[in-house]
Amino acid sequence: MLPILETSGLKVERDFFLVHSPERVDPGNKRYTTRNTCKVVGGVGPNSLEVGVIFYKQTVEEVIPVSSAKAAELVKVFENTFRAVNIALVNELALLCDRMGLNVWEVLEAAFTKPFGIMPFWPGPGVGGHCIPVDPHYLEWKAKELNFNTHFIALAGEINRKMPEFVRDKAYRILNKLGIVPSRAKVLILGVAYKRDIDDYRESPAIEVIRLLRADGVQVSYHDPYVPSFRTPDLEMESQPLTEDLLRSHDLVIITTDHSCIDYAWVVANAKHVFDTRNATKDVRENREKITLL
């Protein structure tokens, strides 16, 4: 931005001020809003930083100044990388637990009771949104310009990108146990938003699961109360009303987004079988034999 702005003849730090304050937003989070989420601000110089801090203090409770705009951007990228790496760790644990015949959710819930030295992260069908699947790889690309390899970022991306394929493969295992040929199966995807209780489906792993299933001839429908329809370069689908008939007409229901407005006990009662990739059915007491967890 700086070279573009200075073509006006104005001088930064004297005639105008330039700062960078990276986004810190958690869609659907009712506890942390723009006002009570501290704001990181970096200026291109001391005067810009001072003006930027004063500006953001008008609306944000706490402002965190850093030494430069570059430092502010690296803060943001590190925050997303931190989440990507830790999600990859629990996703890899889920893959291992599948081999070992253990319930990854039971293991993690017990581990997270430790009052120090650990932080909860949960596995799932992959990562989505406009930050976690993308931003860390900007840093990976930038590091390569400096002849530096960011091993954790590359490995985390590899693991997280494999999760939709794992969901497909495990779904086929479930169908085979039910005596249903996958290529002739009807599968209902429950939730295409990338996280619960929002309407954003950018980079959603659920859509990649749909692609993988359809590529093998599976008939796929979806229901999402927040996403009535979606369109990508290769897919265009509409949400189907969640009814008893819809559930019973499909061989397998895959929960890919755990929206809190859905009655999962009712879903399990009416579905032939449920593959739960989000542990959305953890409080369902009846018909547990019809549930397979990630």
Image (spheres, rainbow, N blue to C red):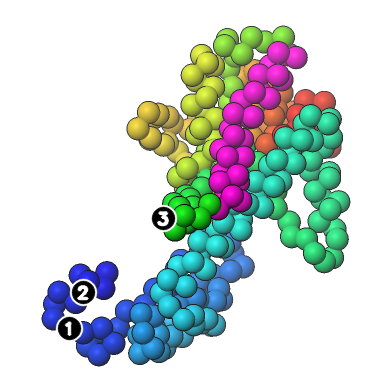
Tell me, yes or no, whether the two marked residues, 3 and 1, touch with CB atoms within 8 Å. Answer: no
- Which span of residues is magenta-colored? 150-178
Tell me, yes or no, whether the two marked residues, 3 and 2, touch with CB atoms within 8 Å. Answer: no
Q: Which label belongs to residue 5?
A: 2
Q: Which label belongs to residue 10?
A: 1
Q: Earlier in the sequence, mark 1 or mark 2?
A: 2
Q: Earlier in the sequence, mark 3 or mark 1?
A: 1
Question: What percent of the width, then of the height, locates residue 60?
Answer: 49, 80
Residue located at (58% from left, 69% from top): 32
Mark 2 closeness class: few <14, some 14–19, many ≥20 residues within 10 Å: few
| Residue type pointed to by label 1 | Leu
Helix, strand or loop at mark 3 = helix
> In the rendered view, would you say 115 is above or below 140?
below
On screen, residue 225 versus residue 262, left or right, reads left
> In 3D space, how far apart are the residues under numbered discs 1 and 2 (Cα atoms)?
8 Å
Question: What percent of the width, then of the height, locates residue 102?
Answer: 84, 35
> In the rendered view, would you say 92 is above or below 2?
above
Q: Which label belongs to residue 145?
A: 3
Question: What percent of the width, then of the height, locates residue 168?
Answer: 61, 25
Residue located at (57% from left, 56% from top): 81
Hey, which quadrant is residue 245 in on the image?
A: top right
Foreground mark, 3 or 1? 3
| Quadrant including the C terminus | top right
